[in-house]
Amino acid sequence: MEALSGLLLVLFVAMISGTVVSVALPQIIGALNGTQSQYTWVVTASLLAATASTPIWGKLADLFSKKLLLQASIVIFLIGSLACGFAQNTGQLIAFRAFQGLGMGALQILVQVIIAAMIPPKERGKYNGYLGGVMAVATVGGPLLGGLIADTSWLGWRWCFFIAVPFTVIAFAMLHKTLKIATVRRPDAKVDYVGATLIAAGVSVLLIWVTFVGNSFDWISWQTAAMVGGAVIVLAAATFVESRVKEPVVPLHIVRMRTPALAIVASLAVGMAMFGGSVFLGQYFQIGRGYTPTEAGLLTIPMMFGVLVSSTISGRLISRSGKVKPYIVVGSVMLTLGFLCLSTIDHETSLVVIAAAMVLVGAGVGMSMQNLVLAIQNTVPLRELGAASGAVTFFRSLGGTMGVSVLGAVLANQVATNIAEGLAKLGIKPSGSQGGNLNIAALPEPVKTIVRAAYGDATGHIFLISAGISVIGIIAVLFLPSIRLRESVDLAAPAKVEEPAPAH
C-alpha cells in the first residue's frame, strides 16, 4: 500500500497536469493572442507526444528497471511543466507541451505496468477502483484548481503549469523510498528504435493533415494525397519492421489475438470520443455560455462524479466475480447515450440537462476505459505486460489525439460559418480575424454575443460525431469473449497465451 500510494500520486500528477490547464486554456490562448487552431494544438501536442512514446515506454518497462524509468519520466515531466509556465507565445507553449507529453505518457503507462506486475488480474479490479478514484479526483479537482488559479490576479495562468512541480517532487521522494520491484535485466535486450520512429512519424503526419485539411487546403488536393499517402507508406514500413525485429515496440502477435484486437478497437473509439468530447466542454462553458474558469470547473463535476462512482463500484464487482465483459459493454452503451444527449445542446440549453448527460459520459468512461486495459493484461504473460499495456494505451491515446484534431477542425469550421452568418445579419462584412482570435474580451459587445452563440451552437455537432464514433466501441466490445480474470500475476503456462480462460 505504501508503494501504491506513491504510484497513485504519480498518476494524480500526470492527470492533474492536463485537467488544471483544460479550463484555463481559453484564457491562456486569449492572453497569448492564439487562435482556435492553436487552441487545439496546445492539447494535441501533449497527446501526440504521449501517444507516440507510449509503446516505447511500455517496451522499455519489459527490458529495464521499471523504477528507474518511472523516476526518469518524472524528471522529464517536471522540466516540461516548468518550461510551459515560462512560455512567451503559443508556439513555445505548443513545443513545451509536446515535451511535457513525453513525461505524461510515460507516467500513465508505467504506473499501470508496475501495478500489474505486483497484483494478479482478479485482485486488480479492486485496485483499478482506486485508480479510477484518483483519476476522478484529479479530473474534478484539476478544473476547479485551474479555474481558481486563472481567476486569481496575483497568481495568473502560468501557475496552472507551476502547480504540478511540488506534487512531482513529493511523488519522486515517496517512490524512491517505498517502491521496491524486481528488475529483470536481459543481456540480449534491444529496443526497436526504427519501428518506434516510423510509428511516431506516420501518426504525426496523419494528425497534422487532419488539423489543416479543409482550411489550409481541400480534402481532395495534392497536399492531402502527399500527406495521407506518405503516412500510409510510413506506417506500412513500421508494420514490416515490427514483424521482423526480435523485440518489436508493438508486438503484432498480441495485436492479432481476439481479445487484444477487439479491446484495442474499443479503446481507439473510447479515446477518440472521450478526449475529443471532453476537451471542448471547458471551452463551451466559458466561450459559449460566458462562465468564468472557476465556474466552468464546477460545471464539469457531474462527469467526474460519474467516473468516480462507476469505476469504484465496477472495480469491486469485477474483483468479486472475476468477469469484466458485462461492465465494459454497459459502460460503452452509457458513453454513447451521454454523447447523444450532449449532441442536442446549444448556447441556451438547461444546465440540468447538460449535467445529466455528463454523468452518463463519466459513468461510461469509468466502466470501460481501465477495464479494457485489464482485459488485455489478463491474456498476456508477465514478460509482455509492458508491451501489451503500452499497445492498448497507445491506441487509446491515438484515438484521443485524432479525436481532438478532427473535432477541433469541425468545431473551427462550424464556428466560422456561424459567425459569418451572424455578422451578415448585423450588416457587418466578416473578416478573417473575427472569431479566429479567442481573446473574446477584446471584441465589441454585439460581435462578442455572436461569437458566444456561434461556439455554443457549434459544440453540439462535435458531440454527435463523438456518439457515432463510440458506437464502433460498442460493436467491438460485444464481440469480446467472456473473460474470467486469472488469480495469478503470470500466466500458468505459455500454451494459454493465445486465448483467455474458457467462455462462461
Image (cartoon, rainbow, N blue to C red):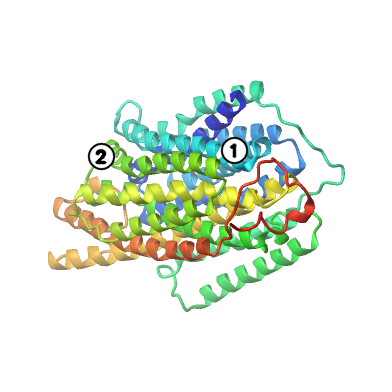
Mark number displayed over residue 27: none
Mark number displayed over residue 292: 2
Q: What residue type is labelled 2?
A: Thr
Marker count (numbered) = 2
Residue 215, placed above or below residue 365: below
Residue at horizontal 71 percent and vertical 61 percent from the top: 252
Q: In this view, does 185 lie to the left or right of 33?
A: right
- Could you tell me which quadrant the C terminus lies in? bottom right
Q: Circle 1 sits in a helix, a strand or a loop, which is it?
A: helix
Distance between the alpha carbons at the discs numbered 2 and 1 = 42 Å
Write down the residue under mark 1: 123
Residue 52, placed above or below residue 97: below
Query: How far across and down, in percent of the image, does residue 14 sit?
Result: 52, 37
Query: How far across and down, in percent of the image, does residue 407 sit?
Result: 40, 61
Q: What residue type is labelled 1?
A: Glu
Q: Which of marks 2 and 1 is nearer the N terminus?
A: 1
Residue at horizontal 26 percent and vertical 38 percent from the top: 295
Which sits in the foreground, 407 or 352? 352
Query: How far across and down, in percent of the image, does residue 335 sit?
Result: 39, 55
Query: How far across and down, in percent of the image, does residue 312 sit?
Result: 45, 38
Answer yes or no: is residue 433 visible: no
Q: Circle 2 sits in a helix, a strand or a loop, which is it?
A: loop
